[in-house]
Image (spheres, rainbow, N blue to C red):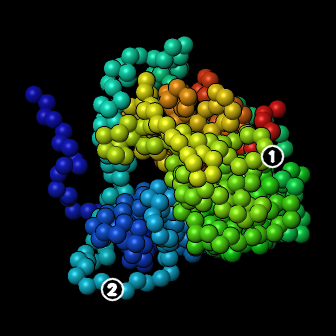
Amino acid sequence: MEQESPDVLSQEPTPSPAAPADFTDWVARRLPPLEHAARQLTGDDTQAATLARELLGLVAMRWSRLRGNDAEHHAPPGAAADRLLQRLFAREVADAVPQHRVRLDLDRTPPARRGRVLPATVEEEAAALWRRGRATTRRRLLIAGAVGAVALGAAGIRALAAGREEGRQPLSALPTGPAALDGVDEVPPVARQLALPVALVAKLPRELAPGDPARLPALSARPTPRALAVLDADMAAAAAGPLLVLGEDGGWRRVDKLPVEAAALLSPGALAPDGARLAVVTADELWVVESAGGLARRHDVAPESPVVVWLGPRHLLVAVDKLLDVGSGALLPAPVGVRDAIAPRRAAGTDAPSTVLELLSAGDPITAPPRVRSWEFAGREHSEGTVAVTGPGAGRLGRFLGPGFAVAGGGGLVARMCEPVGLPVRPGWRPAEAVAVLDPGAARVRRLLVADADVTGSLTLLGWLDRRRVLLCCGVASGATPGVNQRLLVWDVRDGSLALVATVASNGSLSLADLDGAV
């Protein structure tokens, strides 16, 4: 009889192989400040230690590519790893929404804590993290699957087994894997992304390659009525930045009126829908930059997280009861915070919003299914209605991640990233992140786009090109073309097709205004 393979996650750890010397040195410098910041975020030593090592494990997974990035840009060893760690930690802060401001300062050496149990050597710690990096993806999938199983039971297993949705046709199989699930699309590997059909978008160049930021004009000296995109230039010599703005004339500008650290926490929703303003968070401050004049205004309001949510061209949601009118600086009441609020796109008018949608994660609380919550408010008076997401696809939604975007108007859809649940894992493919599109009125999943970051590059949701196509960005992954750091794609939620909009010559974060659509 064939012997059953043991579950490696349930066994005692075996001696870890030695980690590379440069990774060991980096861990020795970065683990103490990371643990300190994680402790401020979680308030618990055990949770902080676990979170810190989870993040370092994710860096370990990408170490060879990060090392190559440093070499290509003649950057100090560990510079690319520092940038990735800052972004990973910022995402945790955005998801946790702490009551106080938490910031990771990698240059600060925290004071030693009494009673803290240290590893025998830094080499042992680095070796354990090196091994952890190879198991992180599987562990995250198992955790997401456990949460999704609870949510699936709450939503009704019969709904998932009922089959495909009415009128939904099965998708063709990808050449590299088995037949796809109904309503579930896969992002192809990097090489195939570059070979996708081209979608031309009005005024947006095929290559987002601004060149040397030092040679670009300042935004204050060359303003633009409307910005189409804002990009973190991700200079190798710095942790992030500077921020660069693409104007309607096709020219790039350097944002010159912000603190130097402004680019570190650039949110995908940072650019207002009309492209007239850019909002960024630095330390305990909120800055809003006007495209037409290049002027930056600091608002005396403590942001809830690095994520910013524009509820219209003039109104920026900062926290509960903090809806900022960026024109007057007045704070208006709002019953929701930024954690789960959905940013409406392609909306008309500049009036203060009276309706806000939220997408709430499965398993929060533990027995809850994914839900759509709608708020109606006028001044201090507000009401809300919550509906569980049901039907085929509901059980595939794990924890929601990052900002979501909705198409304004009747019948508009909602898109938000999540951890996918219950999807098959095959050799060379582990779907660990996804973009989910839902019909909020029916509280049903319309379609899911899944990715394996090691194969496709990490996904970032950027908004809607029009009422049927979602804009997203794929980061660096194996098989990347030199000089092409990221790919800007568009996903058609009617048939699941993908097209290539542009390539991006930077590893930095990107935010887009409402674009004029494909031509």
Q: Residue at x 89, y 52 (%)?
A: 249
User: Which residue is at the far left?
Assistant: 1
Density class for disc 2 (Cα within 10 Å; few <14, some 14-19, many ≥20) is few
Image mark count: 2
Q: Callout 2, which amino acid?
A: Ala
Check disc 2 and report the residue beneath it.
112
Quadrant including the N terminus: top left
Quadrant including the C terminus: top right
Q: Residue at x 36, y 52 (%)?
A: 136
Task: Point out residue 492 in the picture as x, y percentages from the top left corner.
Answer: 64, 29
Whether residue 356 is visible to the viewer of this picture, yes or no, is: no
Q: Nearer the viewer, residue 248 or 162?
A: 162
Q: Nearer the viewer, residue 268 or 322?
A: 322
Check disc 1 and report the residue beneath it.
205
Q: Callout 1, which amino acid?
A: Pro
Q: Residue at x 18, y 39 (%)?
A: 5
Task: Point out residue 201 in the picture as x, y percentages from the top left corner.
Answer: 79, 38
Disc 2 versus disc 1: distance between alpha carbons?
Answer: 51 Å
Dot label at residue 192: none
Left or right, 227 with respect to 44, comes to right
Quarter of the figure with residue 498: top right
Task: Point out residue 480 in the picture as x, y percentages from the top left corner.
Answer: 60, 49
